Amino acid sequence: MKKQSLIKGTLILGAAGVLSRFLGLFFRWPLMMLIGDEGMGYYQMSYPLYMFYVAIASGLPVAISKLVAEKNALGDKYGSNEVLKKALLLMLTMGTVFSILLVIFSKDIIQLLKWDKKSYYSLIGIALGPLFISFLCSFRGYFQGHQNMTPTAISELIEQVGRVTFGVGLAYLLLPKGIEYSAGGAALGASIGAIFGSIYLMVKYVHYNRESTKEHKFKEIGCARLKDKASQGVLTRLVAIAIPISLGATVSTIMSLMDSFLVPQRLLSAGFTHAQAAVLYGQLTGKAFVLINIPLTLSIALCASLVPSIAESFILKRKLELIRKVEAAFKFSAVIAFPSFLGLFFMAEPILNLLFPGRSDGALILKYLAISIPFIVAAQMTTAILQGSGIYLLPVINLLLGCITKIIITNLLVPIPSINIYGAIIGTIVGYVLASVLNIILVKKKMNISINYYNTVIKPAYASVLMIIAVIFVFSKLYSYNLSIKVACIISITIGILVYTLFIIVFGVFKYSYIKDKLKSKAK
């Protein structure tokens, strides 16, 4: 299996992730048209539980990719397969137990978290998801460990197509029974999408294994010795690496889970009705966070490529290569974060009008939530760097401190009528600012690396400012000529992308020859 460079792997996975997010908008848009903000509120109340399991399980694919990368770096082909087998056994056990618990205790969970009873059907709809997510996570971690992001990228697209097709279809068919049933059908689509993604990855693995067996024929005695060595402690190492990583991901998901019951309840304390609270929560999670997650998809792709890449350089003790990869990660993160933040901040209303015609409320929520993007990206990127170099627990502690800060601020500010839902946004921003700053300090201290912030951060910031000036100018001119707000939005954003790309090259953030070389070459 051919390895891909950090940039190539990130671009492949990032392109698939962004496309997957846009497919997700095709899921959100008809769903919003069908069930409105209230129905989206019911759907989103149960969705964090699904994401909670994804977070619990997320440490294992990272651990798998790290261990597989290390095995490959040392030439242990059998060992990488042994890692996958142990991981599958562990994850399938976890997924089965979690799915059963969701079904049995669904009503108790709703009562405990004080959700609306109508969210029951959404909770049942996502109950099968954890079982099949276990397959997805295991095989994705395996292929990412080989530093080949293509199978993961394709599986993401298949999963999303299945989710959109069956989720929207079921929501439409069940709408006559009530909004809550329709929201439940939409939730079931997530489980069905995971099934199709799992089938693709299993077929891909079988095909790769046949090719690999032809290429690598072990002698009987050597193979037996290698098997014995590879089997020893694989499960222990997987768990030891996965637990702190999962804890970190779980902390992030706990933020969403806390919001799912804390924000609606605190909005009630601010004088809002149940329906008004569901509407505001639906705008925050069903619109704003969905759009925020599109640029974060690129950041997640970078992290997925970064962990095995950093792990390989770290285990082979290639210090200069490690420094280059860390600086590239900082630079790539800035290139993603700044234009995304400025674009969503200044173009929030036109973008919502474009995507949700007639239901575009929540522009201010999206605008202010966009401020969190650079800090979320920085926290994710630095966490991946630290995990790839074997530092697992400290970034989790930093994220936990951020989570506690967010909960305190949300709890204090949301009940204030003049602040309301924006208190949750302020909490999110401050929480991630704290986590990202602590992580950056940790990277410099533990890895003894000095970052050139002018090249990695300031230059992308300059390019982003020039980009948004061009976008606002073009949009205002086109709109003043009575052009449709949707057409003006599309044209101005397209021009913004071209302007940003131009200045990224002019400022020498990434040289064209460097990108071209990395896209063609294997990972080094």
Image (cartoon, helix red, strand yellow):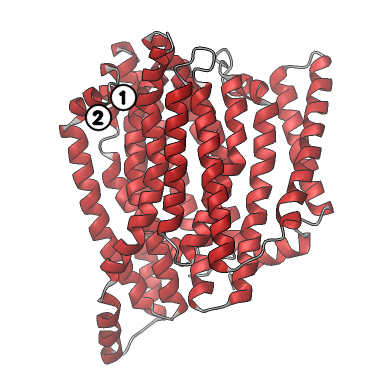
Q: Which mark is drawn over residue 124? A: 2
Residue drawn at (49%, 34%) of the image: 24
Q: Secondary structure at mark 2?
A: helix
Between 460 and 502, the one nearer to me in the picture:
460
> Residue 219 appears at what percent x and percent y?
31, 90
Residue displayed at 65% across by 62% down = 327
As drawn, 267 above or below 221: above
Residue 328, located in which quarter of the rendered image? bottom right
Q: Is residue 423 placed above or below 227 in the rendered structure?
A: above
Q: Is residue 13 left or right of residue 229?
A: right
Instruction: Look at the numbered discs 2 and 1 and tell me whether their residues touch, using CB distance below 8 Å.
Output: yes
Residue in view at x 62 percent, y 66 percent: 449
Residue on which the image places disc 1: 184
* Mark 1: few/some/many CA within 10 Å (<14, 14-19, 20+): many
Which residue corresponds to the image point at 19% horizontal and 45% vertical from the top-left? 97
Nearest the camera: 463 or 301? 463
Mark sitting on residue 170: none
N-terminal of the pair, mark 2 or mark 1, is 2
Tell me how far mark 2 sits from mark 1, CA to CA.
7 Å
Q: Residues within 10 Å of mark 2 (few under 14, many from 20)?
A: many
Q: Residue furthest left?
A: 104
Disc 1 secondary structure class: helix
Q: Amino acid at mark 1?
A: Gly
Q: Position of residue 27 (x, y in %)?
A: 46, 29
In screen coordinates, is 118 left or right of 383? left
